[in-house]
Amino acid sequence: MADHKNHAGHAEEHFREKHLMLDPLPRGQMNDMVMESMHTTSWKFWVVFAILSAIVGYGLFYSWGTMIAEGLGIAGVNRPSYWGIFLVNTVFWIGISHAGTFISAILRVFKAEFRRPFTRAAELMTTFGLVQAGFSVFMHMGRVWLAYWLMPYANQRMLWPNLHSPLTWDLLAITTYLLSSTMYLFLPLIPDLAMARDRSTGWRKTFYKTLALGFRGTEGEWAHLRNAMNIFAFAIIPVMFSVHTIVSWDFAAATRPGWNSSIFGPYFVVGALHSGMGAVIMVLAVVRATMKHMKYFIRPEHFDAIAKLMLIISMAWAYFFFNDYMVQWYGGDKWTHQLLHFHEAGPLGWMWFAMLIFNIAIPWAVLWNQKWRSTPWIVFIVGFFINIGMWFERYIIVPISLSINRMPFTWRMYEPGVEIPLGIGTLAFFILLYMGASKLIPLIPVWEVEEGQMAHELKKFGRETVVSVSELE
Amino acid sequence: MIRPEEIKMSADESGKWGMVIDQDICTGCQACVAACAMENNISFVGEKDSGYGRSMHWIRIERFWEGEYPEVKMTPNQPMLCQQCGSATCEPVCPAFATVHSQAEQLNLQVYNRCVGTRYCANNCPYQVRSFNWRDYERPEPLSNQLNPDVTVRRRGVMEKCTFCIQRIHKAQDKAKSEGREVLDGEFTTACAQACPANAITFGRVDDPESLVSQLAKKRGHGIKHLEELGTLPNVTYFKGG
Amino acid sequence: MTDKFSRRDFLKLAGVGTATTAILTGCGPASRYVKREPYMLMPEYTYNGQSTYYATTCRECAAGCGLVVRTSQGRAIKTEGNANHPLNLGKTCARGQATLHGLYNPDRVTDPLQRKRGNVSAAKMDWDAAIQTVADAFKQYKPNEAAFLMGTSSDHLFDLVTDLCSRTGLNLPVRFGALSMFESRATLAKAAENLFGEAGLPFFDVGGAQVVFSFGANFLETWLSPVSYTRGFAGLREGQTKKRGSFIQFESRMSSTAGKADEWIPLQPGSEALVALAIGRLALEMRGGPLPRAFADIDPRTAAARSGIELETLERYAEMFVNSTGVLAIPGGAALGQTNGLAVAEAVLTLNAVADNFGKQGGVFFSPTAPGQEKYQRSASVKEMQDLVQKMTDGEIKVLFVHGVNPLFELPASLEFKKALDGVEQVISFSTFPDETALESDFVFPDHHGLESWGYQRVSTGSNQSALSGSQPVVSPFYNTRSTADVLIAAAQLAGGDFAKALPFKDEVEFLQEKVAPLLNEVDGYFSAPDINTFMASFQQYGGWWKNSDSRVIPNTADVFNRNLKAAEAEFAGEGEFFFMPFVSPTLAEAGANKPWLQELPDPTTTVMWNTWVEINPETAHELGLEDDDVVKIISEAGELEVPVYRYPAIRPDTIAIPFGQGHTAYGRYAEQRGVNPADLLGRHFNEAGDLAFAGMKVRIEKTGKKQPLSRLESIMGVYGVGLGEEH
């Protein structure tokens, strides 16, 4: 008997160690841990922060300012690659932003319990990623100071944006997505802001007080909040799918070999998730490694779960890639043939192969193994490669595909110029925003973790210890 | 996608200006390119940018090679300019309505001061005949004295392209109107056609069967329109000749 | 209220002001100009947006095409061809279009200058001092110590200087231009003289021909009168009344003219005369009858072997002579610029006798003699230039006046013109632009730009009609420049004596009137007038005067067949393994490099902009391990230069070619330090007519390991498949 009891005790211990939901801590302690993680800032943080600020200052603001003053000539765009890394980065950052919504909204709707500690981290990626996408697309404009002309606003001359243009759809879709994802980030944040308000003093108190909108945690408030979150979780999913589909239409709706493909919509969505999941896992690995108490909240089980999703999405991406390639090739258009050949055998053919290795071979080779999946640094590296691979994919679709058209007299390679500091600037700005956010808002949605821990319990059926989850809502 | 009835409508539209280019007699001398640049205030961009696909030529002369030495041949020079498509692919993609179809002249207009520089039109132009102002290209004084007051000078960030010398069309129309008559065929022509020493370029009303362009098209026959399979309804007809 | 300035008072005062201005400027030539006004100060006679058009003559080359310049409020906006003008019938070439970039060039010489030779900086002078300087030069030196070196346009100034010199005993002016050097005009004229007993510039009726054989004549580019020959080419192809004519070009490198040919025959350089004679002999044999002396000595087999053309091909061409009417053979370009150039010219002209096309449609004529011209006047051959250079070096020339030509750039460096300048005490340049020669002069007294100038140019070839093309200022002078004719007239007056008597004119316009006055009595003119003022008005309005009828001259061909024709092959100077073929850039020509839009025009064959390249056959490049844009050193016996490679698919593997037009060390911001000048490689070798054997050099190639990307309009990927990856 004793042995049996001991065995059951071991199993329970094992479960607790492994699963956050089964390893509850007192609420007060958990709140304090989250608060402490926000307050604890080492000098290293400030060094990195300063370096990134410098990069943003030069790469983003100075370089962009120069480009606005001098024109796009200092970038590498030319005829025929009228769109360059600006659009690559736009698509890339919108792709990154997809993972946030996917993890947060879809997993919430499907009640995937492992999502709880990192929904916030993912949602922040959505918002911050969209900010970079916005930067990138505005950089791309020849006369960015007139960007408001793309917005429908009442004017005496009755000039409206052209609703036939995929770019107008794009702008509307991205704006909608930015607004809704920001709200969707904010709603679950309210209880945590209220928690932080109650545990802060000074300017932080004012800050949280303002943002918490007077949330006190009454039944009525919770009911409204849950309702709102539910509505948003469902509503934002189609928005998310539409955004990247519409982004893909910028290309698919054009009369260009290699672009004019009907499968671009889902292909882009899956591609976005691919890079997005890679980015989420990288962020989680960094957060876990650098911030206090995060090893408690973010555990190998979470890496394992996300890595599984990555593997599936990688397969889906491979499917769409093959499908697109196959149909384009089979179509037999001579310009498309020329383009496909150029992708593999042209001067940047290595990029095409690297894309396949990074997006397919590496995830498939690594992520089948649970042990590797659960090792943060391994999945970090995989996520990194996937992001490089997906950036290459966009690079192949935008400037490389633009190099080949129906007028061979104009074919020309694209050589990036100021796009490089600008691109690095957006990356630095993304990290900078994230670092700032990690010190200002609770990165872990404490109430969600607590809610999950309350719902989970270990039950014994005979010899077996079983996890049971009760429906709270 | 263009609906068939739209194609038909566009093809039947009256008031269409068009061009016939005889590649058999085009010598590639670049007179049209220079004339176009002078007439339309086109910037020169310098050695570096011009070699990097940023030259602003509204008309360029393409030539390819066939065969190997000594049997090598230059393909007939092919002046490539905006084809003023009846169903242009550049038009629907502009988010700001900066490139629009003119019902009056049946031309693709580029409204410089409405252009915000997304460059989508240029990507979507199958003929790759749009040029973008990548910079404020220098035009040291007193070169600006040469600028044609009838044509807007473009600044950085703006797309531009061949207009079929719309300023000349309007001038001729205004003159005809003030004299109470129709514009006569051959009364005016575009800068490129006017300069061409070989008379390889002919400009006029393609909807008028009596006009020189229509007559030429009829006389020569076998004219081709580039990338017609895309349904763009180009208004420039080429004779390869030979 | 009285101290207030009323509107009426203002108008009164303004009226007085205007009248004063009119009187002041009414004395000099300035009153003949339209004033340049800011657009906001609209003169009363102009309407917003209404242009004024002036007829004048293009001075970008010596052909003399008529222009109509559109001006707006005193600014020249656009040049168009003069539709009435018999030479160009309303058309222009690219250089004519870009002439406005010369007029409004930011690097013009703005004031009379005095400088230490070679110094870019110079002291400004006033025009009185400048005229004094010229007058002093007239008086200070003996007549045979002064020399005028002039360009090929404008003719009125040449006439004025000729009058001045012939009446005062100064050395007669020498005219030169790189274009006439590369055209081998002297050779053509000499050949005509030898064959027809009369020197003249032959006119080839390309438009009326059915088959055209061109031996190196690049008549669609810069040769003689490109606009009118291009019109002729269109006529050949369109065949107004006949079928589409065909065109065969013999040339070691495919020029843009050869690019339009149905057949391009890259024959062995130097074998042109053999080929022409062989075709002639084969044709005559096919026809039967006795062989004339001219074709008696040639052996077609040898010719085929020497030229590398199959005998069957020559026979096929000979059949064309037998079976077609309207066969035309044109000698020109590099074929004449060889040591046997004169033999080539004679052989090819004689070939026309086989076609029996002299004086017939599609055949050979003498160009009409221009009004006011007794006999054909050609520009100097390089040999004659060498004589001048020798005199300068020897110190026989003490003062040199240079106008309209830039010998430091246009003459081969091996003539050592720079060294010769050291032997000249005083060099006075009348250059509009700060070119190399102006930089090496003691004084620069800038002439107006052609569009600011009066004058006329004789149409020496290209038109059926005898034509004198008129110039008038279309805008008022932009800078403190002065017409060289006016400067010389004023200086002659100042110098007094014979000089004053030689040029007894108030100003340039009076001189012009005197020169065109004889035309008042001519019949069959495009217009006629009762008095000189009316005549001048029409002359200005129509842009010149010309005859209505065809005034081409039929050459006297009595002796053509009976001459002994030498079937000599060319000799090539130098040790290298490559034939060197310089050619004139069709877009830049001799003086276009300072016009930014001409620089930005792609070369018709290579599409290169803003630079110089060397054309090398891709096979040869492969053997030498050369890629596009590799900088190579080209070494001739006369010099060497470094230039990037363009792998050109249509050139003989043993030939390399470099365009002439770039490589300026002065001449303004758009021309300076850009490209190289192939004239630096040319040695002093001449043909029998004294023209430079510019295509008679052999050169070596050395790798330098450097790269210099050429700006091309074309896509290397799309046109040559470079960088697209392996073939499927």
Image: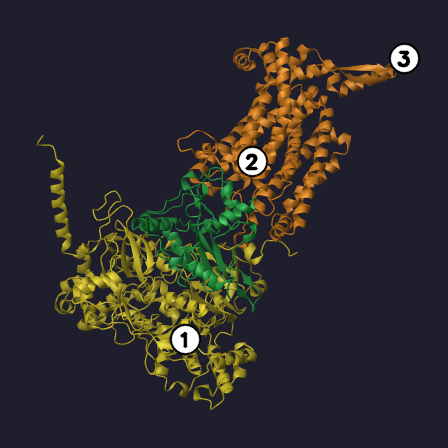
Chain where mark 1 sits: C
The C terminus of chain C lies in which quarter of the figure? bottom right
Residue bearing mark 2: A90
| Mark 3 burial class by Cα count in 10 Å: few <14, some 14-19, many 20+ | few
**Cα–Cα gap, marks 2 and 3:** 62 Å
Q: Residue at x 48, y 50 (%)?
A: B12
Q: For this rendering, which residue is in front, A118 or A138?
A: A138
Q: Colour of chain C?
A: yellow
Chain identifier, colour orange: A
* Residue C716 horizontal side relative to residue C362, left or right: right
Residue C438 left/right relative to C248: left
Q: Position of residue C201 (x, y in %)?
A: 34, 75
The amino acid marked with disc number 1 is Gly
Q: Residue furthest bottom?
A: C290
Same-chain status of marks 3 and 1: no
Circle 2 or circle 3, nearest the eye: 2
- Position of C94 relative to B70 (above/below): above
List the residue tagged with mark 3: A2
Q: Position of residue A421 (x, y in %)?
A: 52, 37
The tag on residue C362 is 1
> What separation in Å lies between label 1 and label 2 (alpha carbons)?
65 Å
Q: Quadrant of residue C204?
A: bottom left
Q: Secondary structure at mark 3?
A: helix
Q: Which mark is residue B114?
A: none
